[in-house]
Image (cartoon, rainbow, N blue to C red):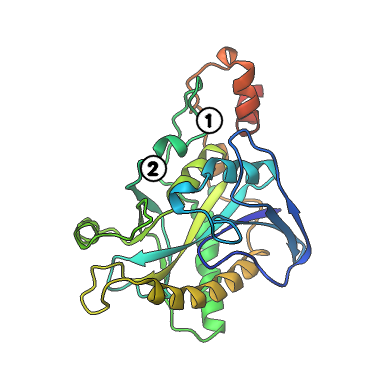
Amino acid sequence: MKLGIIGGSGVYEIEGLQNVHHESPQTPFGEPSDAYCCAEQDGVELIFLPRHGREHRIMPSEINHRANIYGFKALGCDCVLSISAVGSLKETMHPRDIVLPDQYYDRTKKSFEHTFFGNGVVAHVSVADPTCPSLRDVMAQTAREVIAAEGLPHAVHVGGTYVNMEGPAFSTRAESNAYRSHGFDVIGMTSLGEAKLCREAEICYQPMAMVTDYDCWHAEAGNVTVEMVIGHLVANTKLAKAIVVALATRIRDERACSCRSAMQNAILTPAASLRDGDRDRLGLILARHLDG
Ligand SMILES: [Zn+2]
């Protein structure tokens, strides 16, 4: 099995793996954020991509999610987990807690970049449940075990709504309070596009959202600053890497989810109407459906 991992702020590499080499697959959607680091852990192939680049040069709204997810597909991954730094919108979700979101609220203006389709090929995939329940279950159990083994007090919250804002500035207080009034849980800048593209590519996807701050709504915690975020980020990074390594041998090929047949009946443009360019661009994504 090949396990794809997307690292967020603070997670630019995973140390201590064996047989490390790098791959840079060509994609019809442009350049991924960096070379993919391929390595082994306990007989499982891990394929890691830092979404902001190894030197953190790519702003959230500049990330080429299409190229990133296409690259995972090209390298043979049918399973991607991602690590994201988020702000908490709930009193009960503390800095250094882990949240495994099962919903998103889109505050970007980028929906046209969150699909492989368009330019002559139309498809509508369901994202009613946008993240993978099978990955979420194994991730929750593994995260709790790693946290307990390290004697840490952090909680793992299973499910929750991730508000995907665009950034790069953090929220205003009015925005933060508005999201809270809707009952949303965490806020970040990156995961939604990955989730939608993985669904179109029939890849299981689950983010592991690591809380770095209370956004700016919390009267006692004060306004979010970069310094405050960095302290929690460093601790979260260490924990995230430990959880990812532990996950490597626990994710099974057989998964009780429907992610890997998500495009069944989703493509409206008849296969006979596709042009050569469409097949060049989407052949990898739609192989099962075009040939069937
Ligand atoms: Zn799945």
Check disc 1 and report its element: helix, strand or loop.
loop
Q: Considering depth in this image, is 253 or 45 the residue closer to the camera?
A: 45
Q: Residue at (68%, 41%) from the top-left corner?
A: 74
Give the crowd class for mark 2: few <14, some 14-19, many >=20 residues within 10 Å.
few
User: Where is residue 259 drawn, in percent x and y?
Assistant: 53, 43
Q: Indicate the amino acid at tag 2.
A: Ala
**x and y percentages locating residue 36 in the rendered image:** 68, 53
Q: CA distance from mark 1 to mark 2?
A: 15 Å
Task: In the rendered view, tell whether residue 283 sits above or below residue 252.
Answer: above
Q: Residue at x 27, y 78 (%)?
A: 221
How many numbered discs sit on the rendered protein? 2
Instruction: Give the percent coordinates (x, y) of residue 228.
Output: 38, 76
The quarter of the picture where residue 176 lies is bottom left
Q: In this rendering, is residue 192 above or below 101?
A: above
Residue 50 versus residue 256: which sits nearer the camera? 50
Q: Is residue 258 visible?
A: no
Mark 1: amino acid: Gln
Examine the rendering and report whether any part of residue 113 can be seen: yes
* Residue located beneath label 2 in the image: 128
Say which element carries label 2: loop
Query: What percent of the width, then of the height, locates residue 3?
Result: 65, 55
Residue indicated by mark 1:
264
Q: Is residue 199 above or below residue 281?
A: below
Q: Is residue 111 left or right of residue 204?
A: left
Tell me if 58 is positioned left or right of 108 in this view.
Answer: right
Which residue is located at x 52 percent, y 45 percent? 65
